[in-house]
Image (cartoon, grey):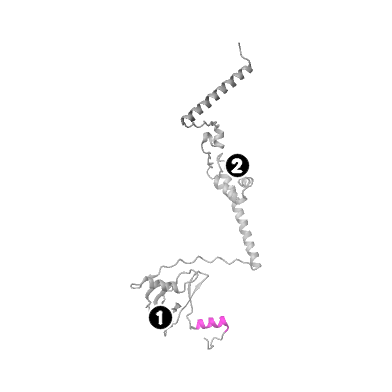
């Protein structure tokens, strides 16, 4: 005699109750015997291939991220489009390349054949046209700033690298370093000294001197008057000897290099000082 549907479900419920009672009795027996319960099984459901590609994590694995392999030239064209038109560049880039926006989207997705000869030629022409327009606009902007007195000073040339100072035989490196550090060294400018022929720093001497060759290959004598207390560190050219005027060197900001002007006491220097300070050229101060 076939059982009814109600009898079928009643039998299933009875079997389930019996299985639960047996499982509970087994757990109690294992606990009394000191047996650790086995972990409950975790069921995982397999993902479809499409789910694994986009969501990842199938069967407990890490998320899968597949990089997009762009066709040759696609990354360059897309980068140019972003620089020209901003982040939302698809339609404008397609117009500049003579293509449909769907073609640009396929380039970005790594599909199709990538930008062709015609698309890159059209894009190059558009870039050159915009560069020309920007150059004209920049020139007009510079003229406007000049009219307002806002002209931007041209950037100075890069500074010359610090030269390697040559030490003559017998010159102590620590003595040479002292004269290099204390002579005309400001604002991280390179030293004007090229060669140190001698360097004398007697511990109890009032004058420390060094014979050097400067950037213009002239031989000069440097002198430091340490004063009576031997604490002075002012360093400059030694007092000019007869027939040997004291040189005038300066840092030329226009060329970012050392330069030499008229010697102190020369007619050119007197004329320069007279013009600078409005003094008579034959005045007693000169």
Quadrant housing the N terminus: top right
- Observer able to see residue 100: no
| Viewer-proximal residue among 261 and 140 | 261
Tell me the residue at 50%/83% (across/down).
Answer: 267
| Viewer-proximal residue among 75 and 47 | 47
Tell me the residue at 55%/83% (across/down).
Answer: 274
Where is mark 1, residue-wise? Answer: 207
Residue sitting at the far front: 32
Secondary structure of residue under mark 1: strand
Image-quadrant location for residue 101: top right
Would you say the magenta stretch is mainly helix, strand or loop? helix
From what the image shows, is residue 217 above or below residue 66?
A: below
Q: Nearer the viewer, mark 2 or mark 1?
A: 1
| Viewer-proximal residue among 285 and 203 | 203
Residue sitting at the far left: 170
| Viewer-proximal residue among 168 and 171 | 171
Asked whether residue 273 is drawn in magenta, I would say yes
User: Which segment did they paint magenta?
Assistant: 267-278
Tell me the residue at 54%/35% (across/down).
Answer: 52
Where is mark 2, residue-wise? Answer: 105
Spatial distance from mark 2 to mark 1, Cα to Cα? 79 Å
Residue 77: x %, y % from top left: 57, 47
From what the image shows, is residue 178 above or below residue 24?
A: below
The first of marks 2 and 1 along the sequence is 2
Residue 121: x %, y % from top left: 57, 47
Question: Residue 31: which numbered mark, if any?
Answer: none
Asked whether residue 202 is drawn in magenta, I would say no
Secondary structure of residue under mark 2: helix
- Observer able to see residue 17: yes
From what the image shows, is residue 15 above or below residue 92?
A: above
């Amino acid at each position: 005699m076939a059982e009814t549907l109600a009898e079928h479900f009643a039998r299933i419920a009875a079997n389930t109750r019996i299985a639960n009672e047996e499982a509970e009795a087994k757990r109690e027996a294992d606990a009394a015997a000191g047996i650790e319960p086995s972990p409950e099984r975790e069921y995982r459901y397999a993902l479809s291939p499409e789910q694994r590609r986009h969501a990842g994590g199938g069967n407990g694995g890490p998320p899968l991220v597949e990089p997009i392999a762009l066709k040759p030239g696609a990354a360059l064209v897309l980068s140019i489009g972003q620089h020209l038109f901003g982040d939302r560049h698809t339609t404008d880039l397609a117009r500049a390349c003579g293509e449909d926006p769907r073609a640009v989207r396929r380039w970005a997705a790594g599909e199709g054949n990538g930008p062709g000869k015609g698309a890159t030629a059209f894009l190059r022409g558009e870039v050159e046209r915009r560069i020309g327009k920007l150059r004209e606009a920049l020139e007009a902007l510079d003229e406007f700033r000049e009219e307002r007195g806002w002209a931007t000073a041209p950037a100075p040339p890069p500074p010359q690298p610090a030269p390697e100072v040559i030490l003559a035989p017998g010159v102590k490196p620590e003595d040479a370093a002292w004269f290099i550090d204390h002579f005309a060294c400001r604002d991280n400018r390179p030293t004007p000294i090229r060669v140190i022929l001698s360097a004398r720093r007697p511990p109890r001497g009032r004058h420390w001197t060094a014979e050097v060759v400067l950037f213009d290959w002239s031989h000069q004598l440097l002198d430091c008057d340490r004063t009576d207390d031997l604490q002075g560190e002012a360093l400059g050219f030694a007092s000019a000897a007869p027939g040997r005027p004291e040189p005038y060197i300066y840092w030329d900001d226009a060329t970012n290099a050392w330069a030499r002007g008229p010697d102190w006491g020369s007619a050119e220097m007197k004329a320069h000082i007279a013009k600078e300070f409005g003094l008579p050229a034959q005045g007693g101060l000169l």
